[in-house]
Amino acid sequence: MSKTLALTEQLIALDSVTPEDKGCQNTLISLLEPLGFVCETIQSNDVTNLWARRGTSQPLVVFAGHTDVVPTGPVTQWQSQPFAPTHRDGKLFGRGAADMKTSIAAFVIATEEFVTAHPDHKGSIGFLITSDEEGPATDGTVVVCNKLKERGEQLDYCIVGEPTSSEVLGDTIKNGRRGTMSGKLTVKGIQGHIAYPQLAENPIHTVAPALNDLVNEVWDQGNAYYLPTSWQVSNIHGGTGASNVIPGEVVIDFNFRFSTASTAEGLQQRVHAILDKHQLKYDLKWTIGGHPFLTPKGNLSDALAKAIHDETGVTTELSTTGGTSDGRFIAKICPQVVEFGPPNGSIHKIDEHIEVRYIDPLKNIYRRALENLLLG
């Protein structure tokens, strides 16, 4: 059994459902400290974070990831126990196999191989690991990033081990993510008997023209890396449940997935302008889940793309699709942030798994990326 596979299984066996770490980071510390890493545990409420660094000079190359996993769902629907790593048909099954304990194991073993072969390499290597990526993400990576910023630690390159590959290992690198912003719109009317509409005001009717405008608004054209910004309604609730009552209000939940071609503030202003044009009586509460970030093609994406091609022969593509990630926090203190990891077809699903044939090549890609960045 390879060292990367063995460490992956060891991590999967720890039931670190968010925000629990369950000793995963202590396992990493036991492997990193003998390599010369200074390891710092940063606790924030129930969340355990790890910052580890080897070296004091620039450039600083950071591997970032999370030890927490999503809940298993009904255990009875799994073919094997979710926290008992199991092999079937050339695949390793277990919660976190793809998202993202294999990546973390590959980070560590790749670093071990690199440091053993090149103990006097230039620059520094860091690990930023959290147990709060699958949860609210308020006590995890953002806390560590703020601490690093306060003490002036400069990150130059960061690889986040999210499962980005689509069909085969290496076909996709994420070099950015869209922002997410939600709104809860409450449009007010006057409740009344449905037989006397002249004595009431139906907010569902009054908001309908505004909704049509919002649906048909072109928010931006996107750019070379992003599709146009998307606005979608996720829930509408109005009425008392009775068929003869005009409701007094309607509540509409919506969400923007927006590119770097727009700003959260600009989108908010345009929504309010549309609602005000229709003279609605409303309240609107905003929640910004994350701002977009983008790393244009450069040293980091080139080094990783070369590592992928040299290891697998695959020509990778840059992509900004998908949901949010902790890359949005790291991008505030690091000029080049990309995400790369194993295929993502089974993440968050029953019987999550990774093909065993990808595990050591993933490790080799991370090691080659270090070589490309720190041996030049």
Image: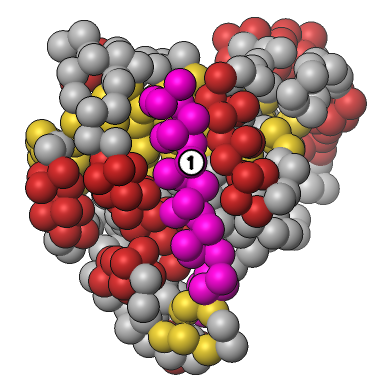
At 58% from the left and 9% from the top, the residue drawn is 265
Q: Is residue 230 magenta?
A: no
User: In this rendering, would 231 be left or right of 216?
Assistant: left
Q: Is residue 254 visible?
A: no
Q: Which residues make up the magenta segment?
A: 349-376
User: In this rendering, would 94 be left or right of 319?
Assistant: left
Q: Amino acid at mark 1?
A: Arg
Q: Is residue 277 visible?
A: yes
The picture places residue 312, in percent across and down from the top left corner, at 65, 53
Which is nearer the eye, 191 or 258?
Answer: 258
Instruction: Report the magenta stretch's main SS.
Output: helix
The correct choice, above or below, for 296 with respect to 88 in the image is: above
Which is nearer the eye, 192 or 263?
Answer: 263
Q: Secondary structure at mark 1?
A: helix
Q: Quadrant of residue 6?
A: bottom left
Residue that mark 1 sits on = 368
User: In this rendering, would 277 be left or right of 4?
Assistant: right
